[in-house]
Amino acid sequence: MHEIELKTERLLLRQWRDADLPHLIALNRDPRVMEFVGPVLIADQSKVMMERSRQSWNERGYGRFAIEVPGVAGVIGFVGLAVTRFESHFTPCIEIGWRILWPFWGYGYATEGAEAVMDHAITLRDLPEIVSYTAATNLRSRRVMEKIGLRRDPTDDFEHPNFLAGNPLKACVLYR
């Protein structure tokens, strides 16, 4: 399969390269970035995440893109599609998600990248509905979900099965 790149006005979205691993490790170990995702990840977990993304590209033709801001910064995070790996009333499904290094928050990069991914997803054949979900308290990601045209039905909200009762990340909202 050939490498897919997407370009927006300010961003380059591309598939992962071996040299990107330190950037992904830094992203996943920042507690600010991981506040609404779960515990920070160790280096080996980030390596597995990168390999899963590569495997998704090879097997499905989609995955998570590394995000660059040409002329400003190298890899600042990721945005893309992934198959949800837990069971709930809306799974199996394909999720659009993003994660951006903290110094690059507030510039609209997540929205710009997610819009490009949604536009690209239209070109993929036989792709079922795309969803996005987050902790109910994650107002920044919820705003991105709304900006890219996803809508929430409160009857779809759910408790994330990977978190124990009492964990503030357990209560999640679903956008379609």
Image (spheres, rainbow, N blue to C red):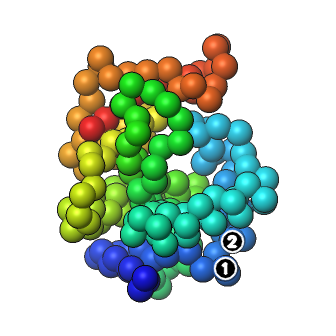
Location of residue 19 (image quadrant): bottom right
Query: How many residues crowd mark 2 within 10 Å: few (<14), some (14–19), many (20+)?
Result: some
Q: In x, y percent, where is residue 113? A: 36, 63
Query: How many residues crowd mark 1 within 10 Å: few (<14), some (14–19), many (20+)?
Result: few
| Amino acid, disc 2 | Leu
Q: Which mark is residue 21?
A: 2
* Image label count: 2
Viewer-closest of 69 and 66: 66
Tags 1 and 2 touching, CB below 8 Å? yes
- In what element is the residue under mark 2? helix
Q: Which residue does the image show at 45% across and 27% down from the upper left?
A: 88
- In the rendered view, would you say 163 is above or below 46? above
Location of residue 101 (image quadrant): bottom right
Residue 26 visible in the shown view: no
Residue 152 visible in the shown view: yes
Residue lying furthest top: 166
Lateral position of residue 46 relative to residue 172, left or right: right
Q: In x, y percent, where is residue 120? A: 26, 67
Lateral position of residue 176 relative to residue 4, left or right: left
Lateral position of residue 28 relative to residue 10, left or right: right
Q: Which residue does the image show at 27% across and 38% down from the upper left?
A: 176
